[in-house]
Amino acid sequence: MSVGGVSPIPGRCGFFVERKRRFCKMIVRTGNSYCGEHADVENGNSRRRIPCPLDPKHTVFEEQLSKHLQKCNSRVKPKPVYYEQNINAGSGDEETLEDQALGHRSKAALDSHLEKLKAAAKALEEKLEDSLLSHPVLTQQLDDPNNGDSALKHLKQQASILGNMEQIGLLGSNRCFVEFGAGKGKLSHWIHEAVKGHDNHHFLLVERSSTRFKVDGKHQQADGRFERLQVDIQHLDLGRVPLLMETRVRLVGVGKHLCGSATDLALRCLFEGVVSETAPPCKRSRYQEEPAPPSHHSATPSRADVCGVAIALCCHHRCAWRPYVGKQFFRENGLGASEFAAFRRMSSWATCNGCPDDQSRDHDGDVEPSDKDILNGVLSAEERGRVGRLCKRLIDHGRVCYLQSKGFMAKLQYYTTPQTTLENVLLTAVPSQPADDGERTRGASRELHL
């Protein structure tokens, strides 16, 4: 059997998928020509397959429908105890405007946004510092000659994140590392390797989708608990996670390329939804005043709950005004939802404006063809790249101000080179009045030669 000169792969399904212009690649049973999904087209087969009512992307034999609905992966599943609808979504009654593409805005409106951007940029630091570090636990992996370009790129980023975490004392004992947007969990894996000499450490991997090839299995017999929470950060109430209710640990929020609004959702999750009655108090320095008695009815966590943040930022064009945590900074500079919508779109110019194909593919912007037409007469490619980077800085500075309002010293740094990734900014934060020096982990971070 062949269609258009193309034949099915031996041992695979003989059904030709018109949409993909190729044969189905599913493996078939011995003696059959079609897979289970396409078995109804086989000659002499009286069984009829129908689309699943829960998800029409797959089909099921009609007589097995009732049984299938009980185990279908698309069925509505019971919500976990830590699920709270939109707990981290931000207020929905604030200013909202229709998000209009730049190409649909007038030149006068675009000029106005650029003027406001330049005025607000005066509040920013002149230049971010470089903090290109590494960590000993990744030395062997970094030196592996079998690494491909993609693998090496991610290893460099993970090594620098760990190096920066060690430098500010986050790799210590009595910690629960919460990795937001965990994916396969590689960052948590390397953090686990880095804290093996410390006591009482646990890991929570937050990821809304089901992920293949997870590293969780490597840590089933680990000394600390290694748990995965399959939930959107928007609906995660950390105060109800059983692990955090059972153990006396402080939280460290981490993430590698936490995309767009996910960073704001994670910060809200850490600082607006955690009330722990079991977490131990941080030790006071001798210069710190006697703390007030903790209030367990406050929606804002005490310093004992969160002891640090290390998040590699990414994809500012996917940010949204409602969950954004830097609204106060924007308002203090005469900016609102309309300017935010424009700046988030302009931020894509930093990574999708004359950048290499492989990097632009990793971080898709949303510059539409109509946008480019109007922009060509206003800004050069170099100017667009500069404006895009400035928009990203402005959005990130709002997050820094938010963390400062929570009593944290927050900082933005370049943690890797633009050649490794154009999304190379790391947001770190530690309490303004840290714990005793004896409690801090002082590792010898080595500079990463990239």
Image (tube, helix red, strand yellow):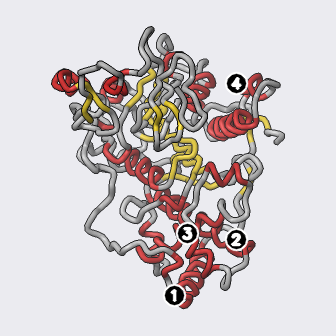
Labels 3 and 1: the sequence-earlier one: 1
Labels 4 and 1: the sequence-earlier one: 1
Labels 3 and 2: the sequence-earlier one: 3
Q: In the image, what residue type sits under mark 3?
A: Glu
Q: What element does badge 4 sit on?
A: helix
- Mark seen at residue 386: 2
Q: In the image, what residue type sits under mark 1?
A: Ser
* Percent x, y of residue 107: 56, 88
For the residues labelled 4 and 2, say whether their Cβ atoms are less than 8 Å apart.
Answer: no
Of discs 3 and 4, which sits in the foreground? 3
Residue 394 visible in this rendered orientation of the protein: yes
Q: List the residue tagged with mark 4.
A: 137
Of discs 4 and 2, which sits in the foreground? 2
For the residues labelled 3 and 1, say whether their Cβ atoms are less than 8 Å apart.
Answer: no
* Up/down of 337 relative to 400, above or below: below
Residue drawn at x 49%, y 32% as measured from the top left: 177
* Percent x, y of residue 180: 47, 40
Q: List the residue tagged with mark 3.
A: 368
Residue 167 visible in this rendered orientation of the protein: no
- Separation (CA) of disc 3 from disc 4: 43 Å
- Closest to the observer: 405 or 391? 391
